[in-house]
Every structure is written in C-alpha cells, then in structure tokens.
Amino acid sequence: MCGGPVWHEVERQWPALPRWWLESDARPCHFPSLLPEDCRTFMPTTATPRRRLSSRVQSPLETYLREINETALLTAQEEKDLSNAIHEGDTAARDRMVRANLRLVVNIARAYTNKGLPLQDLIEEGNLGLLRAVEGFDPNMNTRFSTYGSYWIKQSIKRALVNSAKTIRIPAYMVELLSKWRRATAQLTDELGRPPTPEEIAKLLEVPKKKLRIVKKAIQLYNSTPQTEQSDSGWSLGEMVADQRQKGPEAEMLESDNLTHVYKMLETMDPREATILRMRFGLDDAEPKTLKEIGESMGLTRERVRQIESEALNRLAKGLMGD
C-alpha cells in the first residue's frame, strides 16, 4: 500500500501532518506486521521503557507508538479552541489536533485486525479518517472530538476492508444500501404484518426502478453467503452490512425513520442550503464532503459553509418535530 493512491491522498490533503509521521521510517505503511498484543508491549507507561528497549534496535512501529504516546491528550476546552482556530485556517492548530489523536487511530485499528488487512494498513486508513474528522469537527456540537472522530476513523477503516475483501467484492455504497434495506424490511414487516415485497421496500427508500434489479442481485449474493463463519479474508459480508448501522454524530437525524420526509423537505429548502446538506451527508449515493471541499466547490469559506449547514439543520430539525 505504501506509495499508492491512499498515501498520495494523505500528502495532498494534509501537508501539515507531523513531520515524524510523514518520514519514511515512521509511516504506517512501513510497519512490520504485528498483532495487537505485540504492540501493547511497546506502549510506554513510565520512564523505564526506553531503558528496557535500549538493548535492541526499535522497529518503525515501536518508534511510532512511542512518539505518539508522548503527545499530551487534549481537554474539552482545548479541542474547542483548536477547532475554532482550524476553521480560521490555522495549520499549527490542525497539526496539534492530529498529533493528539493519533493514539485514538491505533486503538481503533487494533479492533479490526485479522479481518483482511494488516495493522499497518489499518492505521494508514484510520489516519485518513482522522484527517477528515479534524477538518469537519464542529466545536458547537457539544460532544468530544473522540466521539466524532471515532466515527470517521471507523468508516475509513471499514471502507478499506470492504474494498479489500477477497471472497466477495461489493461497492461500499451498496453495502450501505443493503444496511438500509434490512432496516426498511424490518420496519415494513412490523407495519404490514407480513414480509414486504422488494418493490415496497424500494418505494420506501426511494430507490429508482433501474437500480432495483442490481439490489436484488446483491441481496441474493448476501443470502447465499454464510453469515456465521468468516471468509478467508476474515471479514464476512454479514459483518460489513451490520456495522454500517453505526451513525455519525450529525447523521442521527438523517438516518432515522424520517429519511423520506427529509428528502421532501430538501426539495422545499433554499437551494444553497439543500445543496450543502446533500454534499455534507453524502446523500444521493455521493461521498460525504468536508466543509473545505464544499466551500471550494461553491466559492464559500469553510466557516460560512459551517454556518449555513448549522442554520439548515436547525430548520430541518424543527420541520421534523412539527414546529
């Protein structure tokens, strides 16, 4: 994976990453394959580990873990202050936010080992999610960055696992659609008192007829796949679909049973507000965009995009609650 498109994307998006992380001997894609239990022994907890490890040469992974463990964690107020500075274009603030949360990526990545990718690749993919989270974190969300960042880190890792699955290759967007399809099936079964037809589910999810045939084939593939045993890549389709139920902090409202109503409300909203929400949350089968990406495409500053998004979400929430 080293030197591939993923790494080039990191260098393109984040020129201000910590220098020691960008150097070749510290980049995750150069780490040897080590299991999580191996890594725990390298995490320094006192002043003695350096002396204990001095008798042998440290691996790049050991060096990386030692370096990131020496970075102090942030308080809630520091996270807010740094985030506000980031929205104003302060690269030093972005650098500090990234440094302080690299341990979070490693901790999350360890939970996904033995599922198809080595730990070093999981860390690299998780760092991509961290970059997106640092760019998009809103200090006014009344939540800690670790909660918000964990979502994007996990999503980035899961997407990489989906795309690298050896037994079954299925587009990431289709995995997400299958997850929604399963929830809609359960909802309609309760409402109708019988299993719904594919056409009824498609109508609820507003899936175009031309896509229904593709969805049916994906469902057949899913139903024919063992759900209790892992594939040889260690990551079954059942696990991938189920994990898509994890929602982002802002997406809780959009992922609820009111999704259909949300789409209808977007049609009546100010076009600019509707466009920002569609881009921000990846509606219409698109990839979610960061505030910076939206601002560049619409000729707005990142802060202005955040303000418009906040105002639009407030109006949307009031509409959903019937106010």
Image (tube, rainbow, N blue to C red):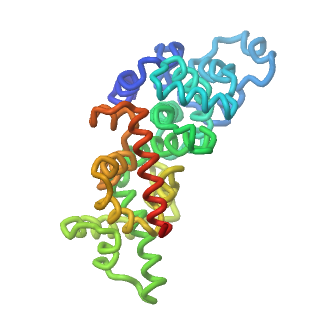
Image side of residue 103 versus residue 309, left or right: right
Above or below: residue 122 compared with residue 50: below
Q: Quadrant of the N terminus?
A: top left
Image side of residue 69 versus residue 245, left or right: right
Does residue 286 appear in the picture of this structure? yes
Q: Residue at x 46, y 14 (%)?
A: 24
Total tally of numbered discs in the picture = 0
Q: What x and y, as percent, mark residue 25?
A: 51, 14
Closest to the observer: 144 or 196? 144
Residue at the extreme bottom of the image, as rendered: 193
Q: Residue at x 23, y 67 (%)?
A: 208
Closest to the observer: 241 or 56? 241
Above or below: residue 98 compared with residue 233: above
Q: Residue at x 43, y 33 (%)?
A: 303
Above or below: residue 39 compared with residue 113: above
Closest to the observer: 240 or 179? 179
Q: What x and y, as percent, mark residue 224?
A: 37, 69
Q: What x and y, as percent, mark residue 136?
A: 47, 37
Q: What x and y, as percent, mark residue 85?
A: 53, 24
Residue at the extreme front of the image, as rendered: 323
Does residue 169 appear in the picture of this structure? no
Closest to the observer: 15 or 22? 15
Q: Residue at x 42, y 80 (%)?
A: 188
Quadrant assignment, res 150: top right
